[in-house]
Image (cartoon, grey):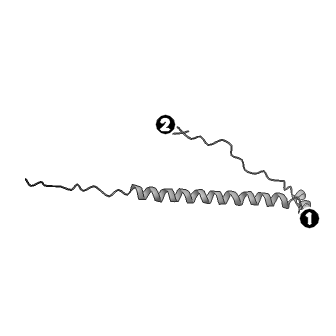
Amino acid sequence: MNAVFTAENYPELQANEQYTILMDEVTGTQNRIAVARGRYIDAIGMFNIGIKRFPANVFAGFFGFAEKDYYEAETELVTPQLGEGTLPQ
């Protein structure tokens, strides 16, 4: 008996490569956000210190500059549960 073997031609899956690229972009975005947040916090801190020192405190009071508050998120992040079948609102 001669057995005939046929090889199935599966398409090359590129989802793994695309997923890796997406995760790299997400990681890069998170890093840029973290850097920007750190720079913002540093800038607010320097501003608040600067308007308290002489002679800047005289000009700050004259022109109405006041101490700035640090940014605080309004709501907590809500992670949806798997299997609900609905998107968070």
- State which quadrant residue 35 falls in: bottom right
Going by the picture, which residue comes out furthest to the top?
A: 84
Q: Amino acid at mark 2?
A: Thr
| Mark 1 vs mark 2, CA separation in Å | 57 Å
| Residue at image point 56% right, 41% down | 79
At mark 2, the secondary structure is loop
Numbered circle sitting on residue 55? 1
Going by the picture, which residue comes out furthest to the left?
A: 1
Residue 22 at x, y = what percent? 48, 57
Badge 1 crowding class, 10 Å Cα cut-off, few under 14, some 14 to 19, many 20 or more, is few
- Apparent side of residue 75 relative to residue 4 in the rendered image (left or right): right
- Apparent side of residue 49 relative to residue 42 in the rendered image (left or right): right
- Report the quarter where the C terminus lies: top right
Numbered circle sitting on residue 89? none
| Residue at image point 52% right, 59% down | 25
- Apparent side of residue 63 relative to residue 35 in the rendered image (left or right): right
Residue under label 2: 86
- The label nearer to you, 1 versus 2, is 2
| Residue at image point 32% right, 58% down | 12
Q: Amino acid at mark 1?
A: Pro
| Residue at image point 54% right, 56% down | 26
Q: Nearer the viewer, residue 12 or 66?
A: 12
| Of the image marks 1 and 2, the number of the one nearer the N terminus | 1
Going by the picture, which residue comes out furthest to the bottom?
A: 55
At mark 1, the secondary structure is loop
* CB-based contact (under 8 Å), mark 1 and mark 2: no
Residue 56 at x, y = what percent? 88, 63
Total tally of numbered discs in the picture: 2
- State which quadrant residue 27 falls in: bottom right
Badge 2 crowding class, 10 Å Cα cut-off, few under 14, some 14 to 19, many 20 or more, is few
- Apparent side of residue 67 relative to residue 24 in the rendered image (left or right): right
